[in-house]
Image (cartoon, rainbow, N blue to C red):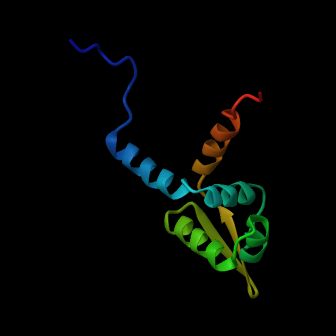
């Protein structure tokens, strides 16, 4: 016999949307980009320098996150700056920070 659920279940549609975002964020470079962009907006070259990967690889990550509404960009002259516009990466990064393995 099944017991009654004590809390309201999250609607399946909402879980499916969360999975889409989690798939996009499930890459160490993308998480690092979000971590960097939570504090300030940055250009592709600056992000590439921090990540130590080529700018074209950074651009691919940025375009994917922008396509999923996580990031947006602003142009100033010839420079394009990226920033986080979706707060979901914030709680995910906070969760990761809060669940670091205990030091031995």
- Give the left or right position of residue 18, taking residue 13 as reference: right
* Residue at x 63%, y 56% (from the top left corner): 28
* Residue at x 68%, y 64% (from the top left corner): 83
Q: Position of residue 9 (x, y in %)?
A: 37, 30
* Residue at x 61%, y 68% (from the top left corner): 72
Q: Position of residue 4 (x, y in %)?
A: 29, 15
* Residue at x 74%, y 58% (from the top left corner): 36
- Give the left or right position of residue 92, taking residue 2 as reference: right
Quarter occupied by residue 52: bottom right
Toward the viewer: 16 or 58? 58
Toward the viewer: 46 or 73? 46
Residue projecting furthest to the left: 1
- Give the left or right position of residue 35, taking residue 4 as reference: right
Toward the viewer: 87 or 28? 28
Q: Position of residue 47 (x, y in %)?
A: 74, 69
Q: Quadrant of the C terminus?
A: top right
Image position of 50 with respect to 7: above or below? below
Quarter occupied by residue 43: bottom right
Q: Position of residue 97 (x, y in %)?
A: 70, 39
Count of numbered circles in the view: 0
Image position of 69 with respect to 78: above or below? above
Quarter occupied by residue 1: top left
Image position of 63 with respect to 12: above or below? below
- Give the left or right position of residue 87, taking residue 97 as reference: left
Residue projecting furthest to the bottom: 78
């Amino acid at each position: 016999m099944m017991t009654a659920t004590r809390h309201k279940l999250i609607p399946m549609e909402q879980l499916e949307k969360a999975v889409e975002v989690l798939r996009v964020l499930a890459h160490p470079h993308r998480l690092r980009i979000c971590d960097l962009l939570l504090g300030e907006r940055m250009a592709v070259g600056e992000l590439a320098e921090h990540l130590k990967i080529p700018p074209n690889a950074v651009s691919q990550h940025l375009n994917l996150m922008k396509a999923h509404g996580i990031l947006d960009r602003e142009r100033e002259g010839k420079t394009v700056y990226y920033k986080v516009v979706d707060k979901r990466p914030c709680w995910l990064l906070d969760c990761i920070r809060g669940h670091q393995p205990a030091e031995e």
